[in-house]
Image: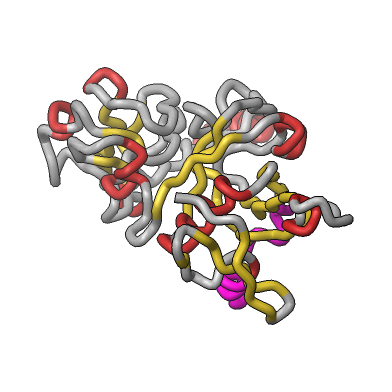
């Protein structure tokens, strides 16, 4: 019995020692944590037609100027051209004109394209507006700092009719058009390559039919026309701008080749033209 007890005690001591050794090893080398499982989420995408490189306003587009790019469907707009809606868009875009500038990677939007056989200027001209050209020089166009899409006033300077007849007089200066948009300076229709100054000889203005008549008359009867650049903060049209345009120069009546000028509430005819 004594031998059996000794054997049992020996086995128990050995088991205890083994358990102690295992506990010490586990405390020194903790078990590696299982890697966190990353949730895999699928994002619905759609192929969107974008500009492959910068496309300037007025450029005739071709297939190599655009490309398909994968976009998240949630970030796509109904205005974008997608492969699902128009699989042949790269081919169909040939010959379209860029109404505005597209930058590299920018989605192509149909409303910013001109699909027309007409000239570019007539295509971008808003309904009811006219494009009228007038001669300018650096000293009559804010030193050449007027750029396309700027807003300007048109100032007319002419000799007083009394001075023209030898009577003491001077020059009359008045603003004949208010807050009109410059469509182009010569053939330049937008700022290019960081160019900040465009010195040209002809400015094309966006006018109403009545403003076009006023400018045509002013070109005939004035010594010079000056474009006065408006501040961006003052570029919004005011309700009375059209009224001022109509009242400053012309009463809208041409009699026997003469022009009726309304100034200070008094109408008088000045040297006519045919």
Towards the viewer: 76 or 255: 255
Identify the image quadrant of residue 247. bottom right
Judge left or right: residue 173 versus residue 106.
right
> Quick check: can you spot residue 5?
no
Towards the viewer: 28 or 219: 219
Measuring 42% from the left and 33% from the top, which residue is drawn there?
57
Give the residues drawn in magenta, as a range.
230-247
Q: Residue furthest right?
A: 168
- Give the x, y percent position of residue 221: 60, 50
Measuring 32% from the left and 50% from the top, which residue is drawn there?
76
Measuring 27% from the left and 55% from the top, which residue is drawn there?
78
- Give the x, y percent position of residue 51: 36, 29
Judge left or right: residue 26 versus residue 98.
right
- Give the x, y percent position of residue 255: 46, 67
Identify the image quadrant of residue 93. top left
For the image, the number of numbered tags is: 0
- Give the x, y percent position of residue 68: 26, 30
Q: Residue furthest top?
A: 64
Identify the image quadrant of residue 139. top right
Towards the viewer: 104 or 269: 269
> Quick check: can you spot residue 187?
yes
Judge left or right: residue 100 versus residue 161.
left
Towards the viewer: 113 or 231: 231
Measuring 29% from the left and 52% from the top, which residue is drawn there?
79
């Amino acid at each position: 019995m004594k031998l059996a007890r000794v054997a049992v005690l020996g086995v128990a001591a050995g088991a205890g020692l083994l358990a102690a050794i295992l506990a010490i090893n586990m405390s020194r080398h903790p078990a590696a944590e299982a890697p966190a499982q990353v949730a895999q989420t699928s994002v619905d995408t759609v192929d969107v037609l974008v500009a492959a490189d910068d496309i300037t306003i007025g450029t005739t587009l071709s297939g190599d100027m655009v490309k398909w790019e994968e976009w998240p469907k949630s970030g796509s707009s109904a205005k974008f051209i997608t492969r699902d809606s128009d699989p042949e868009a790269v081919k169909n875009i040939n010959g379209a004109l860029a109404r505005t500038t597209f930058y590299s990677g920018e989605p192509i939007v149909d409303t910013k394209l001109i699909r027309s056989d007409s000239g570019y200027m007539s295509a971008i001209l808003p309904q009811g507006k006219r494009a009228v050209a007038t001669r300018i020089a650096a000293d009559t166009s804010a030193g050449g700092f007027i750029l396309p899409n700027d807003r300007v006033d048109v100032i007319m300077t002419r000799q007083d009719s009394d001075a023209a007849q030898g009577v003491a007089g001077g020059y009359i200066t008045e603003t004949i058009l208010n807050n009109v948009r410059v469509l182009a300076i010569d053939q330049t229709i937008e700022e290019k390559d960081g160019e900040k100054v465009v010195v040209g000889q002809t400015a094309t203005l966006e006018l109403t039919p009545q403003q076009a008549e006023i400018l045509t008359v002013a070109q005939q009867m004035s010594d010079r026309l000056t474009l006065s650049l408006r501040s961006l903060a003052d570029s919004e049209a005011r309700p009375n701008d059209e009224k001022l345009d109509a009242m400053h120069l012309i009463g809208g009546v041409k009699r026997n080749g003469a022009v009726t000028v309304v100034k200070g509430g008094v109408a008088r005819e000045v040297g006519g033209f045919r």
